[in-house]
Image (cartoon, rainbow, N blue to C red):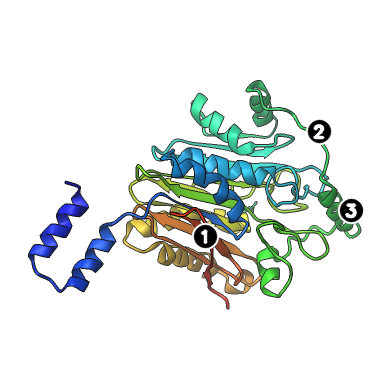
Amino acid sequence: MTPSRRSFLRLSALALPLTSVQKLFAKSVVRKPIVISTWDSGQISNAAAWPVLEKGGRALDAVEQAAIAMENEVNCCVGLGGNPDRDGFVTLDACIMDEKANCGSVAFLERIKHPISVARKLMETTPHVFLAGVGAQQFAVANGFKLEPAKLSPDAEKSYKEWLKKAEYKPVINIEHQQSKGQKGHGPFAPARLEDGSFNHDTMGTLALDNNGDLSGMCTTSGMGFKMRGRVGDSPIIGAGLFVDNEIGAATSSGQGEEVIRVCGTHLVVEFMRSGLSPEEACKKAIERIVKPNPERAKTFQVGFLAINKQGEVGAYSVQKGFNYTVTEKGGKGVVINAKSYFS
Ligand code: GLY
């Protein structure tokens, strides 16, 4: 007999009012399999992850498929179609983590289409966790990943030419905040470019709980548009852009990576869940930790956290209005949910 069935029978025997019994029993029922991704463009990543989970596959395989789907998008903030750095090169950051605390990360990786699969290869075939730059690229090529042409996508080229007119190194409030002011934002088929064809930056993160009850996650991005050459954000950093603890839950982030790194954001979210908070409460407390030292500065950027716990409960919270996420479970249809925010 499963523990949840046993506890149900025990509670029934106490002859509690049925509603209370149902409530307590419902809490012990795990919501799985389930996959959640940052943004409404998470409909693309979840659609790629779901067939894996539906067949009883591993959460790790599901989140890798989610990342690959986004990295294939030609006009997105993720993958080689993203905006370049200020010297005109697209550099990619990604990481992946499984239920046994295995993890792999790549940063400042150029001309490789699927950084997530390089991160997984690193995790599964070497004693290392993190490779950057030329070394990451060499590792990828040595493992059969194709070196793509050093060429910007047509949209990225247009954005870059536009940016070069002023060439101001001034990270601006990113897409998520602009979106809340009524500009074009994410959407399943139009991810992340502003009206003028540009976007600043953001990131795709996916977390999955498989039928076996195991958690995994991924985070992938081309990072902040027109960033300083060599700049790396939170996305490839375990504990910042992604953290998975199979006993407790998992979290990922999107938005201005510097702010997430400062507080070890996703590790913090998981630790708040460990102390008993729900995923949404945990994300909210981590956002408050970011805002508190300098609320004025916090008005100028966006960060969103997304989390799931071992029961399959999910939640998110952001600094600015406009952050959302996609949930896919039984039935396979992605449902988009708006996150609450610190500033309204
Ligand atoms: N969150 C992505 C970045 O800051 O690069």
Whether residue 234 can be seen here: no
Identify the residue at horizontal 21%, vertical 73% (top origin): 19
Q: What residue is disc 1 on? A: 305
- Residue lying at the far right in this picture: please name it: 165
Give the spatial CA distance, label 2 vs label 1.
34 Å
Q: In which quadrant of the rendered image does the C terminus lie? A: bottom right
Residue 161 tag number: 3
How crowded pointer 3 is (Cα within 10 Å; few <14, some 14-19, many 20+) is rated as: few
The residue tagged with tag 2: helix, strand or loop?
loop
Q: Earlier in the sequence, mark 2 or mark 3?
A: 2
Residue where numbered disc 2 is placed: 149
Residue 167 shown left or right of residue 92 in the figure? right
Residue most toward the top? 142
**Amino acid under label 3?**
Lys
Q: Nearer the viewer, residue 307 or 136?
A: 307
Answer with mark 1 or mark 3, whichever residue precedes in sequence.
Answer: 3
User: What separation in Å lies between label 2 and label 3 (alpha carbons)?
Assistant: 19 Å
Q: Is residue 329 left or right of residue 295?
A: left
Q: Amino acid at mark 2?
A: Pro
* Proximity of marks 2 and 1: CB atoms separated by less than 8 Å: no
Q: Secondary structure at mark 3?
A: helix
Please tell me which residue is depicted at 62% across the width and 65% down the height of the picture.
Answer: 302
x%, y% of residue 189? 70, 56
Look at the picture and state if 152 lies above or below 183. above
Q: Residue furthest bottom?
A: 344
**Numbered disc 1: secondary structure:** strand
Query: Of discs 2 and 1, which sits in the foreground?
Result: 2
Pick the residue in front: 60 or 245.
60
Residue type pointed to by label 1? Phe
Q: Is mark 3 within 8 Å of ligand 1?
A: no
Res 190 quadrant in image: bottom right
